[in-house]
Amino acid sequence: MDLSEITTMLGTLLGVLTPLGGAGAWFYRKQNKRLKEAETKLAEVSVDKGRIEAKKQETDRLLAQIDHQQGTIDKLTERNEKLVQMNAEKEDRHQQDIKDWQDRFDRATDRTREVQREREQLANDKVALVEQIGELKLELARKKCEDTECPFRRPPTADTPPMPDMARDEWHAARDGAGGSDTETNGKRSIANYKI
């Protein structure tokens, strides 16, 4: 076959096939439809892939934010535990201080009560002593002689004469009978000679 025959055959074949091109499209319509659907699906998949990438980026950002927040929560939890421990230690110290203060208060209260009992006892003793002193003063006043010449004078002074061999009443009776200066008209001793 020579070249001109080949070109003629090709031209004829092309001439026959050219009008069949529209018919070829009709024969391949289902396949073309599937191709268009596949291209549409590919475009949709491409859009979905973009969305997935965007969601993945958002998810990565949120995960990083969660990690950061978890780190912050861990730090705050650790700080809170330290503060709770410090607060517990302070509370223990305060409770110990309160207990110490209560013990000191109890000791001071006991000491105050003891001092009050002692004061009451001393006051009672003082009252008893004052009463006893009063009784002794009364007894002394009854027995004390203001007569400076009396040998029975209590308490004696440097001028008190020595005691005679007779009783006090006898000596006073003898002296009063002799006309002493401290007698009343009836011969009894004057009450002015006694200090009350």
Image (cartoon, rainbow, N blue to C red):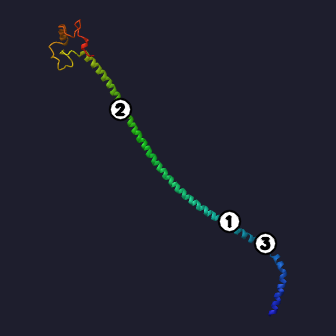
Residue 93 in the image: state x and y as whole percent: 43, 46
Question: Mark 3: which amino acid?
Answer: Lys
Q: CA distance from mark 1 to mark 3?
A: 26 Å
Q: Which residue is mark 2?
A: 115
Q: CA distance from mark 2 to mark 3?
A: 117 Å
Q: Residue 19, located in which quarter of the rendered image?
A: bottom right
Question: Crowding near pointer 3: few (<14 within 10 Å), some, many (20+)?
Answer: few
- At mark 1, the secondary structure is helix
Query: In this orientation, does residue 111 appear?
Result: yes
Residue 183 in the image: state x and y as whole percent: 22, 9
The answer to whether 59 appears left or right of 92 in the picture is right
Which badge, 2 or 3, comes first in the chain's sequence?
3
Which badge, 1 or 3, comes first in the chain's sequence?
3
Residue depicted at x 82% and y 88%: 9
**What label does residue 185 carry, if any?**
none
Question: Mark 2: which amino acid?
Answer: Val
- At mark 3, the secondary structure is helix
Which of the two discs, 2 and 1, sits closer to the camera? Answer: 2
